[in-house]
Amino acid sequence: MDSSVLPATLDDQFINGRPVAGARRFEVRDPGRTADVVATVAEGGPEDVDAAVEAATRAGRSWAATELDLRIELLTAAIEAVEADALAELLARENGGTRFESTMDLSRGLALFRDLLGRADRVLADRTVTADGYRIVTEHRPIGVAALIVPWNSPIVLTLPKLAPALIAGNTVVVKPSVLAPVTLGRVLRTIAERLPDGVVNVVHGDVEVGSALVAHPGVRKVSFTGSVAVGRQIMAAAAASVKRISLELGGNDPAVVLDDVDLADAAPLLARGAYTRAGQICFAVKRVYVPRSRHDEVVDAISAAVDGFRVGHGLNPETTFGPLISAAAKARVEGLIERAGGQVRTLGAPTAEVDWDGGHYLLPRLVTGLSQDAELVATEQFGPVLPVVAYDDVEQAVAMANDSGYGLCSSVWSADPDRALGVARRLEAGGTFLNSHNVSSLSFDMPFGGVKQSGIGRERTDLGLLEYVEEHAIRVPEGTR
């Protein structure tokens, strides 16, 4: 379908069970066809944050008192009402992903919600330890109002693993989508909110002003944020004033350590996919590759051959491998990294026939060699379709260089010998490490997600994700007490 002929939609906030227009609106434009206005969205302010937190606080009393089984029943019905297939094209138009990526974002996000629902009875059950003359009962209680501040690149799969545990545990929420891609997520949230009591789920649109008001609000007791390290630091500092609970999933500069026995026929296409999917705009994409000096040229040629088959274009074009960057600022930043990179820069891939270079934020993929460990492109999270490959002399050096970063989100090790790869993986400083894979599909539902060092605090998904949204209340009960 030609997205340029589709009319723009009007999308509102959703507070206390009703749409709220607000006094201002902002445009959401297709990053692959910037003349195309996808939607005009109501822009909130501090007054909308106040109203949303007040609504969530009122609703929280009865929602927290609702039996867990009933909450699960209501949430199951709400998530089943989301029509994912009808939203995939809209998501591709607002955030520049391909139709496949958008479909996967929606389907995986909903599946993660269901997975967390299935864990709730077991994870949130009271724990009892019996001792001589007494027992200790530990209850799981909701924290209160949770502010969920979420990004644009995979808005569904990065929001629902926050939303699900928050609501399952009995919290109420105020969600602030990214202004770069608020539309699809807003509709998913409204579908859920309309099937729950008023005020349980609220949506406020806006940028820094709204986010700052949420984090500082005295009625918010938990903040969960996915985004940049710089903003994460600001949230952490602001939350300290009232000692809010925080979960932070921040940036990554994920290393892939290729060992000298790697099978490139299998590994090269997977490395290419791990680095360039979504134009590299994934927090745990492969951001730097370390290869043995003895196989450097062979590895570079194999990855280049895989990437050279990629096609850059609009996400709704079935020939497209990856789409545009999200904004002109994002494109300019990545172009600056490429221009300053030094070394040898290979331009790979090709555009699809319909690409309008002036009308979209497109970049062809690059692969850069000949860089040192301290080069800007190696040390920086590029968040775009450019990949540095760095040579090493022995595994000790490779591990040291992989760990030489303030980030620690994910990493990967590539080898024909899984036991050898595991030994290297256990020495890497990361929240998660993959063997012979490193992409969205590598992150299974049973793998906790989060970072170490400056890549974040806390974990999402799995049992650990549920426990991020509860307070534990321990009660010492004398023997004989019911």
Image (spheres, rainbow, N blue to C red):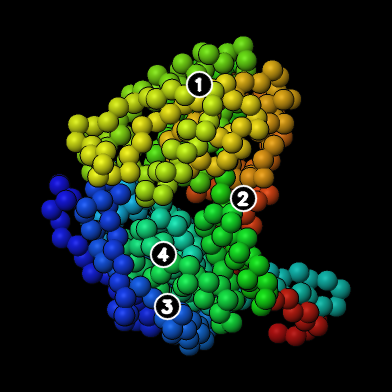
The structure residue drawn at horizontal position 27% and vertical position 70%, both measured from the top left corner, is 11
**Disc 3 target residue:** 45
Of the residues tagged 1 and 4, which is closer to the observer? 1
The mark nearer the N terminus, 3 or 4, is: 3
The mark nearer the N terminus, 1 or 4, is: 4
**Disc 1 target residue:** 344
Q: CA distance from mark 1 to mark 4?
A: 39 Å
Horizontal placement of 132 versus 78: left or right? right
- Residue furthest to the left: 5
Callout 1: SS:
strand
Q: Is residue 75 visible?
A: no
Q: Identify which amino acid the numbered label 4 is placed on.
A: Pro
Q: What is the number of the mark on residue 229? A: none
Q: What is the number of the mark on residue 177? A: 4
As drawn, 179 above or below 392: below
Callout 2: SS:
helix
